[in-house]
Amino acid sequence: MAAKASSSSSSPSSTGGFFGPIHGPSQSGRMAALMLAPGPRALAMLKEADDHESTAMVRMICGGRFCEVLEASTIFKRLRDACRESVEAECLASEVSKCKEKCPREELLCVSVASLLLFMQQNFTGPPLDAKTEAKIVPPTSQKDALDELVLAGEDIGYNIKSAFLLVLARAILRNGCEESKNEGCDSEEKGDNSVVGVKVQPPLNFCWHLWTSRMCVIHQKLFNVNVPQLQRPSLQGYQRCVELISGLETSKLHPGFEELAVGILLECVQCYLIYFKTKDAHRILERAISLSKFHLSETGMLGKRTKFQVDSKVQLVINCKSDEKRLSYEQSTVWPFWSARLGTITPSNDMRKGDAKDKAGDKSESNDNDGNCQFSGVFPEIAPLDSEYLLEHIKLDAKAEKEKEKLIDGRVSLLDRAIMILKAISIRKQTMGGDVIAREQCLALLYTAIHKSPSIASGGRSWGVFSSLLYHRAMWEAIDSEMSTRSLVQLENHYRHLQHEVKSVSLSACFRLSDAFISCIQPSFKIALSLADGYKKMNMLQSALDEFTKLQCWPEMIRCSILLGRKGAAEEMLLSQIKSIEEKSSKTTTQGSRSEKRRMRELARMYCFLGICKNDPEYFLKSWLASGKSYPKAKRLLGQYYLDRREWKECIIHYRDALEINPIHLESWYNQGIAAMECKDYDVAKVAFSRVVTLDSEKGEAWNNLAAVHLHVKNYKEALGALEYAVKHKRKNWKVWENYLTTALNLKELPKAYLGLQHCVQIRREKAVQADIIELLTAATLKETLPKIENAIQKNKAANDVDSKLDCNDNDKAKADKQKDEKGDRVSNPDSKSPVPSTQNSKHPYNSAQEMRLRKLGLGPGSSFRLYDKCLLRCTSMVSHPSLWGARASLYELINDYDTALEYRESEMQGLQAGSWYESKTRAEDVIKAAGSMVQCYLAKDQKTAARLFVKGIERRVKLSDNLSADETFMQKVQKLVDTIPNPQKSAEKKKRSTSAASFLSDWA
């Protein structure tokens, strides 16, 4: 991608721009290596690098020697010395600006990258630095101040964060440099091989600044349990710039290293979008990454067994995946040779491995590799076996299916494509919110395949970040399954223990673990410890859980475990002592408003919150809010939740409003505020709240449904239906959503959508979903829409027949016309003629030829309301037999004078109504009389008066035997009216006889 250079220090490669082939040293190569850092791919970019002053620094970063980079940098020393007494963002930004005037931007960028990667080593991947080395890098007095600087929107930062100064330093440098490079770059005037029309081409250095700034924001966001607005915008904007550049690349002309970089950046963008609930954009970019990677990923079903006692084979989900040969060969020549020569230095030391359980599952999976090398035992977290009483470790396919699998499914999957499988599983889970059983099986199948598939080349499973992330996410998703929860807990124990292992070479081990960290969705180590402690609590191992939570100083969970252990009093005393200690220190402080005083007040606010949780007393939440200087949103959220639970809606709204002023992207606060506003009928506030929820997370079906309910309350039916269409898309198994969809569509006379709503309601709730009044309204609306079409069709047919008759009258050949008329009469009267005969209906062909012809003549072709409603009722009656559904079907066929079919449905309706002792309930009896009247009309239309008379007599006899019904004069009048609808042959004969005798008398008299 050719681009005009803005300066000599930021000119792209002359061989095709930033994402172009590498032929010799260039800034593009150095920056690409820095973006791929650390690891062998990054080092491969620097093989032919020149003696540029920053090349040596980039090479050290690519090799994992972050401490050496920082110790050798005069910039880092100056910034560190400026923060020895206190760490302040403004002071640090000022020092960065001064350094920027005296040193190259590349060196400043390298310092920030090394600081960020070293922070990740300390808090995400390990191995941690020893205390002596850490003291050389991080100012000893800076930890508390740095943690204060990392707090955003008043939200609590994670537990046991180490070397926080490094992240603060990286943030100060990257944000300063990113602001400078934001407006740099130039439009491509000369079209190169990879030029993108309309896309602003970023010089390599600027592109690198934006990418690392976005990475820093994502790492910072992972330290919080909730999303914060200060990090959302810069991270999304930075990745968006990267995606715009990558979207127009011609992959066939990319160097393999640049191609892997492009795919990796797209995967990082997907991860960022998923963090902030941008699932649609994440899915779109993930598909682009799969296309760019040339990764074949599909699903199929094969016969096999899942349990130990299963006799018959069932269809099992199998993932078909295959990586591009070009990528596999590049990994085989670049990645694996580098690590195979260094295995001994990145394995845990012998004394740390003593007492560890032997890695049975890991050894087994490693031994399947073609290289036959098992030296990786201990390098990865140990794979926990399933050890289930009835579930198999792996799906056992049938012999035939196994042979088919070997033919169709290739075992070679690159580590980049395994990262794609992780993000694919996370994306599916985010879209379904973890509630869909089928989606859960799909996600686990992707993870199982990525973990256990034996690669044909050794590099396929050698990424620590990807492999650890696979095991972590599998453990988290298996925790809800009672049969797999034990393996989930053991896996988390293995992972947590693995992070504590000491290694022989810290720098190489850090390089190995961080080489694919940004694409693998790894989590900070404190979240793994929290997951482990939570697993202990779910397994009722409360003391172990309490010990782990105590190590992390996770006060809310410490309180909950103490209460479950019957130690609530001890927890309260501990909190009160902490509060007293903080208050004593504050009383001795003479400098009000100092950083230390603000820190103590924030800690006091946290303690008051925890005490409020322990005592369930809102007074302490209010004290927490006031102690923090009205800057601690968690206190207000807890107050809002307290009043929400007690149905004090107005108080709840006020407290959530205060919390949202500080953190306006907290999704749960908006949702709860909307619930409270709906309950107190403040629909304006509810509308705003639920609109913000669906803006933050468009996949939240409950919010769409509630937003529709708000629109319904204020009579905005069109907006309500639009919201419900999103709701049913994400909550397809929620009958309440479908019921709202049905009633709203019916109100707007959107009959096809109403039919769809009725069908899904019946599918989910069966008989409970059928409401007679809704069916009656739906039927009436369908008949009202269909009747004018029938009348128009009849008029058109009549007009056409009139024209034909005039033409026949002008024909002088009367004999020929009479002959045609006679032949036509013979065809009608002849029972042996080949006229279409009605046949029974079925779901595939709902109409026979006679019915099809009749419907077309009446203007009721495919897509008409008549056909759509009949198809809906056909599906509903196939799932549940309800009188209202059969009556609705009968009404449709009575409209087109198909009384044979209508009578069948009326009989089914009567069978449903007369089930049980219908005559004991007046309401049911009235329904029977009403349906009987319709059935009688069908009999009379078919001229079956005797059948109608016998049917009515049976009902009349049953009614007269009932004491309750026979004593009701009004009801008996309805029965008599039903009897009178059928002509009586005896009365007709007597009437005819009387009229005949009177005529004879008059004639005789005359």
Image (cartoon, grey):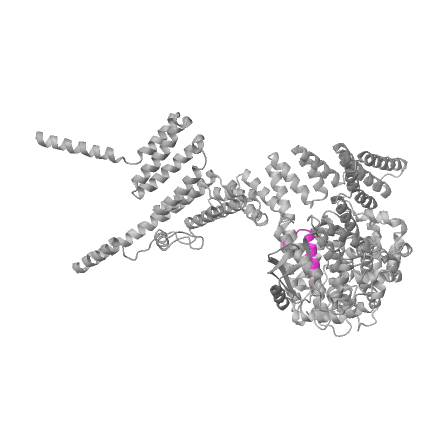
Q: Is residue 504 visible?
A: yes
Q: Position of residue 771 (x, y in %)?
A: 49, 39
Total labels: the figure holds 0
Query: Which residues fall within the magenta stretch?
Result: 265-279
Q: Judge from the rendering whether residue 190 lies leftward or rightward of residue 868; answer left or right.
A: right
Determine whether 82 is above or below 617 in the image: below
Q: Position of residue 490 (x, y in %)?
A: 76, 52
Q: Furthest residue to the right?
A: 132
| Viewer-nearest residue: 748 or 942 | 942
| Viewer-nearest residue: 31 or 557 | 557
Q: Position of residue 896 (x, y in %)?
A: 35, 47
Which quarter of the rendered picture does the C terminus lie within? top left
Determine whether 546 is above or below 99 in the image: above
Magenta span includes 484: no
| Viewer-nearest residue: 183 or 517 | 517
Which picture quadrant has residue 558? top right
Which quarter of the rendered picture does the N terminus lie within? bottom right
Q: Judge from the rendering whether residue 891 lies leftward or rightward of residue 673; answer left or right.
A: left
Q: Position of residue 835 (x, y in %)?
A: 30, 56
Magenta span includes 266: yes
Q: Is residue 194 visible?
A: no
> Which secondary structure is most common in the magenta stretch?
helix
